[in-house]
Image (cartoon, rainbow, N blue to C red):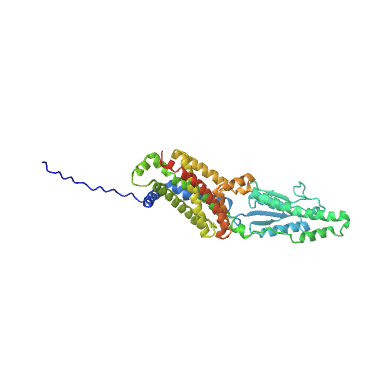
């Protein structure tokens, strides 16, 4: 009888799968380290929006306090009531802080100043102007010497427009008073004994309303603040997709397939990519807020409100990238499609110019853009409004993210499958 054979059974140990949370953090850290070494991310996330905000602010002025005009005036009708009154109007404008007015002795001197570029535009009050106005003969745009002449430089079209508007407004006011007196006389009131004196008294009355610069225009409509916010949001929708769509590049290169062979859940892979993109967006927006505040004196408003808008904005950018990534087949297609969507949403949302100044159709279409709502929120904060004022913007951007996020969730397998 054969001796029994001893069989030794080896204990097989199964390596437990890495937890989804830990794997996601590892993948996110790897992506962030890789992006940090990639100069293109720094370009989209920080350098480009900051540089463009500086250029726009310097080219267009830093705000209402940064726009100024140099204008000149020559009064060839000294002693005339209407002429002196117009000079007084220009003196009031000179004290506004945005327009400086320089007086010249005569027509030749002020024309020479415009030609030399000392002033952008100038008014010339001709001799006999007051008499012609009292006779209701002068008016803006007249080619005779009776009206206020406006001369301007071809390189200072805005200054010329400002000067022309002031002259036309002054003459229109005088014509209105003259018309009112004539109307009363024609209705049986009788001609006044001193119509010229009555007109001067009427013109000396305080205006029924006065437009003044308020706190809102000084704090919330500064160009530095507007372009700092708009360009930061605009490039956010390039930065986040660039970081998130890297999963498709790894899929096409085969890296993702090798990663899925390891004991790493698929949800951890997608979660790690999402986390890396989220951190990239938060860091880039935060850096831009700090940089534009220090370099451009941008007024962002309450830090808590700014932080909330940044978070919902980054989430919206992630939703756009995720939805686009599940609707195309290759990384190249995803990059091109995400860029097109970012540009369209940015233009609709007013990233380069306020969309409210456009047509009613654009005004309606702009409401589908998260850029529009984020800029509305930043504007409210820059006005000094409390954090509660941004909740409509937060809800609108959150709804946008939810819709696209559901689209991406339903088609999530397209991310990891070729």
Can residue 3 be seen here? The reply is yes
Q: Tell me where residue 146 appears, x and y as whole percent.
A: 78, 50
Q: Residue at x 53, y 44 (%)?
A: 343
Q: Residue at x 57, y 50 (%)?
A: 372
Quadrant occupied by the N terminus: top left
Side (left or right) of 200 relative to 252: right
Q: Tell me where residue 211 appears, x and y as whole percent.
A: 68, 58
Residue 88: name its quadrant. Answer: bottom right
Q: Residue at x 59, y 45 (%)?
A: 365
Question: As drawn, which residue projects farthest toward the left?
Answer: 1
Side (left or right) of 155 relative to 406: right
Q: Tell me where residue 329 appears, x and y as whole percent.
A: 45, 38
Can residue 112 be seen here? The reply is no
Q: How many labels, in total?
A: 0
Side (left or right) of 262 relative to 63: left
Choose between 128 and 305: the one closer to the eye.
Answer: 305
Quadrant occupied by the C terminus: top left
């Amino acid at each position: 009888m054969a001796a029994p054979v001893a069989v030794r059974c080896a204990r097989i140990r199964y390596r437990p799968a890495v937890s989804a949370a830990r794997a996601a953090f590892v993948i996110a850290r790897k992506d962030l380290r890789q992006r940090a070494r990639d100069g293109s991310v720094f370009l989209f996330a920080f350098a480009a929006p900051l540089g463009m905000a500086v250029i726009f602010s310097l080219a267009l002025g830093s705000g209402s306090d940064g726009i100024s005009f140099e204008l000149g005036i020559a009064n060839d009708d000294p002693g005339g009531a209407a002429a002196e009154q117009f000079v007084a109007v220009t003196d009031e404008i000179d004290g506004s802080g945005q327009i400086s007015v320089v007086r010249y002795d005569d027509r030749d001197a002020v024309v020479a100043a415009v030609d030399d570029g000392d002033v952008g535009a100038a008014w010339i009050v001709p001799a006999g102007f007051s008499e012609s106005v009292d006779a209701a003969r002068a008016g803006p745009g007249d080619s005779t010497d009776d009206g206020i002449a406006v001369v301007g430089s071809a390189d200072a079209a805005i200054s010329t427009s400002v000067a022309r508007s002031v002259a036309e407004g002054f003459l229109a006011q005088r014509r209105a008073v003259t018309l009112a007196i004539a109307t009363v006389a024609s209705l049986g009131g009788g001609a006044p004994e001193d119509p010229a004196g009555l007109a001067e008294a009427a013109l000396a009355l305080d205006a029924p309303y006065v437009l003044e610069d308020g706190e809102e225009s000084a704090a919330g409509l500064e160009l530095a603040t507007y372009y700092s916010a708009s360009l930061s949001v605009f490039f956010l929708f390039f930065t986040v997709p660039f970081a998130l769509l890297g999963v498709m590049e790894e899929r096409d290169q085969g890296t993702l397939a090798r990663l899925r062979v390891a004991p790493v859940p698929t949800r951890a892979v997608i979660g790690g990519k999402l986390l890396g993109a989220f951190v990239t967006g938060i860091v880039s927006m935060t850096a831009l807020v700090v940089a534009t505040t220090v370099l451009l004196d941008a007024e962002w408003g309450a830090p808590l409100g700014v932080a909330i808008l940044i978070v919902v904005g980054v989430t919206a950018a992630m939703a756009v990238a995720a939805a686009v990534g599940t609707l195309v087949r290759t990384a190249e297609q995803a990059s091109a499609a995400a860029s097109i969507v970012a540009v369209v949403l940015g233009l609709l949302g007013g990233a380069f110019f306020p969309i409210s100044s456009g047509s009613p159709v654009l005004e309606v279409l702009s409401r589908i853009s998260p850029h529009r709502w984020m800029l509305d929120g930043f504007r409210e904060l820059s006005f000094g409004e409390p954090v509660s004022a941004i909740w409509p913007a937060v809800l609108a951007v959150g709804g946008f993210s939810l819709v696209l996020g559901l689209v991406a969730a339903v088609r999530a397998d397209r991310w990891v499958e070729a």
